[in-house]
Image (cartoon, grey):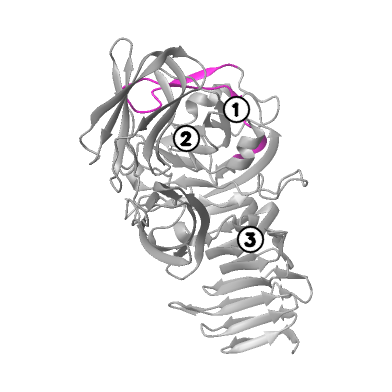
């Protein structure tokens, strides 16, 4: 393998060139069909040097850095990097400690494909010792970028300028500050794949690791961005205690129904952290309108905060410093739409659709995110929680499930009840026309969790039955719940529906009807054949709904390959946001 000596003159690379240490003091051009491969060495671009990585159409010039034999390598740039080609840092199963530094570090398309799995965890990192700019796109295929006290700046306002199988193998995120150029537009929903290594190293790496956010600047929500602002920087800050709420604070009308319901939030979640989100220009005179989505690690969050039934974004100004003595109470009313909370049941977040959300799907549905909508400024965001209270009832869940493939059990639970006479159980075979099949008395008044169920034996195989409840107050006031469905089957039934809805806005689902219990493995690919998401699901006899949270993906076409009983099934999904 040849050593590539310092370059003191202009050179054109039209083919494949292998080198060890690469030192550039003059001008180097990598043509669109060329590959410059740095194997087991470092890259040093002097202040007098320039590296132009060109591309034509979909064909890119490439610079690959692979230092598996060394275990560590450095990319230093004090000169200039131009063009629209790509630079890839590689570690094929052997983690390389890559370090990036210099006074003027820039990449066009940057690809991180650095990995070594130890006990199922990817321990590979790329560490920044200076700020880094990426002019075209960042692909976090494998590995974690650690920015230290610096930042990585994606200087491209295309929402698809960052891609990757985020969080896979407890990696593929940015630990530190990520800055993204942003703008308003039809599809301008920006994912910030950020997180932090947990402080408690005795715990699994996935705990408190990947905790991304998204900033929704789509024109369909009436988003506004000041003309003087170009970018937004965000980071996740792990902290055991971000503060308290000094008084019980109540919000109302949180479920967009005629029944007024209350959610109480009276503590900030512990042993988690907060998000710091700031634009490049930040002052009170700027006019903003955007929605904020947080995607916290649910397992870690709920493990550390047992008893949580509700969660909400709390937003405090830049002058506010999170910490054990900090009080978030004054900022509830400035923390976005007061109805943007979620309930917590069976380790899941459940969110009720608002009047401006898409009409598809049930009004009460599972989600991985917590939203604050209609925000007009940027600052620090934390999570407040509580045990909740409801008027006239707070419905935790409603489910319908086949039992022994013989009857359908309709079951539900309430967290609180006030003046609740009871529930009329209604059934339909078309999802439109319902009839009363039973009455179940309520508790009147209760502040504890109550469980209810009704067994429906009058059902036929292979017929999909829809159920809902009519909740009735002691004064005769009525309120309908959302609709659930179930089916018992004859033997040998197994069907998988297409995605519903399709095209989808953010989330979609498939319905699986089976006569036997089994496991499903679902892998979602993009049109390039890259794996976007993997998941495993256990289905029971009858009708099963599997929901996919896909709001973080860019618009486009995706394919799901479903593996069950040594058979493979393919389903196509189109994401198309208004």
Give the mark toward the camera: 3 or 1.
1
Residue 146, disc: none
Indicate the quadrant where residue 140 lies.
bottom right
In whole angstroms, how far apart are the C-alphas of marks 3 and 1?
A: 42 Å
Front-lying residue, 317 or 413? 413
Looking at the image, residue 467 sits to the left or right of residue 134; the answer is left
Q: Residues within 10 Å of mark 1 (few under 14, many from 20)?
A: few
Give the SS element for disc 2.
Answer: loop
Residue appearing at x 59%, y 54% in the figure: 167
Give the mark toward the camera: 1 or 2.
1
Q: Position of residue 335 (x, y in %)?
A: 49, 30
Q: Position of residue 322 (x, y in %)?
A: 66, 32
Front-lying residue, 132 or 199? 199
Residue appearing at x 49%, y 78% in the figure: 55
* Stretch in magenta: 247-275
Q: Residues within 10 Å of mark 2 (few under 14, many from 20)?
A: few
In whole angstroms, how far apart are the C-alphas of marks 1 and 2?
A: 41 Å
Q: Earlier in the sequence, mark 3 or mark 1?
A: 3
Q: Position of residue 134 (x, y in %)?
A: 57, 63
Q: Earlier in the sequence, mark 1 or mark 2?
A: 2
Looking at the image, residue 101 sits to the left or right of residue 503; the answer is right
Q: Is residue 465 above or below residue 529?
A: above
Q: Is residue 563 above or below residue 227?
A: below
Give the SS element for disc 3.
Answer: strand
Residue 132, disc: 3
Q: Which residue is mark 1?
A: 307
Looking at the image, residue 291 sits to the left or right of residue 198; the answer is left
Q: Position of residue 56 (x, y in %)?
A: 45, 79
Residue 25 belongs to magenta span: no
In whole angstroms, how far apart are the C-alphas of marks 2 and 3?
A: 30 Å
Q: Which residue is mark 2?
A: 285
């Amino acid at each position: 393998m040849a050593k590539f000596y310092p370059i003191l003159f202009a050179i054109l690379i039209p083919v494949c060139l292998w080198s060890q240490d690469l030192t550039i003091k003059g001008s180097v051009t990598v043509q669109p069909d060329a590959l410059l491969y740095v194997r087991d060495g470092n890259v040093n671009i002097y202040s007098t040097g320039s590296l132009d990585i060109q591309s034509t159409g979909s064909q890119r010039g490439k610079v690959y850095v692979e230092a598996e034999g060394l275990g560590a390598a450095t990319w230093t740039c004090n000169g200039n990097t131009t063009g629209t080609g790509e630079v890839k840092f590689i570690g094929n199963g052997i983690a390389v400690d890559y370090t990036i530094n210099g006074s003027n570090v820039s990449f066009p398309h940057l690809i991180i494909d650095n990995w070594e799995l130890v006990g199922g965890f990817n321990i590979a990192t790329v560490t920044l010792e200076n700020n880094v700019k990426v002019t075209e796109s960042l692909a976090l295929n494998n590995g974690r970028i650690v920015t230290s006290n610096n930042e990585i700046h994606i200087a491209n306002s295309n929402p698809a300028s960052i891609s990757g199988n985020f969080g896979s193998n407890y990696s593929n995120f940015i630990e530190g500050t990520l800055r993204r150029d942003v703008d308003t537009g039809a599809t301008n929903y920006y994912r910030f794949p950020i997180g932090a290594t947990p402080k408690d190293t005795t715990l699994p790496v996935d705990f408190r690791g990947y905790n991304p956010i998204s900033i929704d600047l789509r024109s369909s929500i009436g988003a506004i961005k000041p003309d003087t602002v170009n970018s937004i920087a965000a980071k996740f800050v792990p902290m055991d205690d971000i503060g308290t709420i000094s008084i019980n604070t109540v919000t109302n009308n949180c479920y967009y129904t005629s029944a007024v319901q209350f959610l109480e939030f009276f503590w900030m979640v512990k042993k988690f952290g907060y998000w710091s989100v700031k634009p490049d220009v930040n002052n009170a005179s700027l006019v903003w309108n955007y929605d904020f989505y947080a995607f916290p690690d649910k397992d870690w969050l709920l493990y550390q905060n047992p008893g949580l039934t509700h969660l909400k974004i709390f937003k405090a100004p830049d002058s506010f410093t999170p910490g054990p003595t900090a009080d978030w109470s004054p900022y509830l009313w400035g923390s976005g739409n007061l109805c943007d909370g979620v309930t917590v049941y069976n380790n899941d977040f459940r969110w009720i659709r608002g009047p401006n959300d898409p009409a598809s799907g049930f009004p009460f549905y599972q989600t991985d995110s917590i939203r604050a909508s209609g925000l007009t400024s940027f600052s620090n965001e934390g999570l407040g929680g509580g045990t909740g209270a409801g008027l006239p009832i707070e419905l935790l869940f409603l489910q319908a499930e086949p039992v022994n493939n013989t009857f359908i059990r309709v079951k539900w639970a309430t967290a609180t009840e006030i003046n609740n006479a009871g529930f009329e159980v209604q059934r339909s075979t078309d999802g439109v026309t319902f009839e009363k099949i039973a009455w179940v008395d309520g508790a009147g008044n209760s502040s504890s969790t109550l469980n209810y169920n009704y067994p429906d034996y009058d059902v036929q195989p292979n017929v999909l039955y829809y159920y809902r409840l009519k909740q009735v107050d002691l004064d005769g006031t009525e309120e309908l719940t959302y609709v659930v469905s179930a089916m018992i089957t004859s033997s040998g039934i197994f069907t998988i529906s297409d995605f519903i809805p399709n095209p989808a806005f953010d989330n979609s689902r498939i319905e699986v009807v089976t006569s036997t219990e089994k496991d499903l493995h679902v892998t979602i690919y993009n049109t390039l054949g890259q794996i976007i998401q993997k998941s495993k699901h256990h289905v029971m006899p009858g009708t099963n709904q599997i929901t996919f949270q896909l709001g973080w993906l860019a618009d486009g076409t995706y394919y799901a390959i479903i593996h069950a009983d040594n058979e493979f099934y393919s389903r196509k999904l189109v994401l198309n946001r208004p």
